[in-house]
Amino acid sequence: MAEVQANGLRFHVQHLRGGRATTDRPTVVLLHGLVLDNLSSLYYTLAPPIARAGFDVLMYDQRGHGLSDRTPTGYDVDTAVDDLTAVLKACGVTSPVHLLGNSYGGLTALHTAYLHPELVASLILVEGQCLDPEHSGAAPGAGGYAGGWVEDISNTLNLIAIGLECNPLGTDLVSRTARKAARMRATADALLNRTTLIEDVTTVRLLTSEQLAAVPCPVLALFGAGSNLVDSGPLLAEHLPDCTVEVFPDAAHALLRDAPERLLASVLTWLDTRSPASTAFTRRGTDYAARSSGYEAGAAGHDASIAAFDEADDADAVDEGAA
Amino acid sequence: MTAETTTVPFTPVQPRHVAVSADAILAELVAMLVEVVGEELLIATTVDRDSSFNADLAIESIEFVALAEKLENRYGSRVDFMAFLAELEMDEILEMTVGTLVDYIAAQLGGAGGEG
């Protein structure tokens, strides 16, 4: 299933059928981050071992990202939630899912759990940009946030957008790496300068403490100790009814790159304990654990390799745009 | 490749799929790459066994995902690509040559690979 039509556009979808032997475990849905990210960052890291543990894994490129359609508008959280529910429906997923969101994908995941609790068995927020630790005393329900990560992201994206517009491509596109960088720049330029993405991110609404208290599903919130978002952990734990926080030392925002082994272990443990499994599944899980070390080594260089794969050469200007 | 057509004396012949030659797999792989990336792929470069997906062909990681899906659809019942990718470090995936992938497929399909 490479493509589905959902919410009025075409989404690139990857559906790994790890649970096809039996169907008693929820599908695990993985949401990637913003701008330069796409489902490949999850496809090469978390998805295979989760599938091997006996889960169906569903990933899709968010609107405007990867191989999905780029629309001029619709980059706000509410539309992202609508996109998710439409993709689930289009893929025939009708039971509650484990929903994992990386970075900005965590915001979509949390809002989905709040707006559509019937769809979500549990949440895993990987450095989720869900609260604003620098403005925890503010009342986000009163309107868009000023300051904190929202402003940081907006500023960063605006700078990149200006840079792309003011520094058009040179004419030396002979080499393949140059053409690849050109494609990346064109994609980022189109997303940042010809859609409402920056505006939509800037006006994001964060859930209030009351809204957080109404999220019924269990939540695993994972942070890097060196991340600006790490102080969100205690706030989430305080307001969410059922929230487990783990902080990884020697890691920052990019947990997929900084702490792939610990991240994977935490995710698999969480999924296993939240998904009643048959004896066969338990055995498969054990088998997986025994052979996982080789894989995890492979995941270690992922983010860096994405950079090498996709952001080679002079694409460093847009490198900071992934959030 | 040629050795594969010779029956080894006194060895029971096991039923198996007809081996696909590495050359045939390479041709199919190139066609899939063109489907994913576009005809421009072939304008400036010849895709051969020594072509690196990253350095030579400049395949983006998301394009490699799309390629893997096409391979899965074509050979999936006999070749476990997710297992193949999961065993590799990302650097190895990055620097993989077309020939490496062709050989893996050929080996999984029944030993027609090697240096063919």
Image (tube, coloured by chain):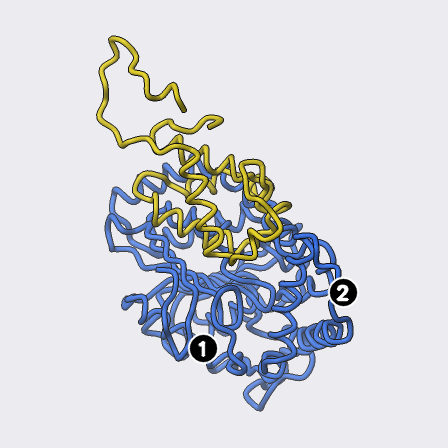
Residue farthest top in this picture: B10
Query: Residue A213 got which mark?
Result: 1
Between A70 and A177, the residue placed more toward the observer is: A177
Give chain B's shade.
yellow
Q: Earlier in the sequence, mark 2 or mark 1?
A: 2
- The reply, left or right, for residue A169 in relation to residue A186 is right
In front: label 2 or label 1: 2
User: Cα distance, mark 2 to mark 1?
Assistant: 52 Å
Q: Which chain is blue?
A: A
- Front in this rendered view, residue A201 or B26: B26
Q: Tell whether label 1 touches label 2 (CB within 8 Å).
A: no
Element under disc 2 = loop
The quadrant of the rendering that contains the C terminus of chain A is bottom right
Residue A297 visible to the viewer: no
Q: In the rendered structure, the residue with mark 1 lies on which chain?
A: A
Q: Residue A170 carries which label?
A: 2
Question: What SS does tag 1 mark?
Answer: helix
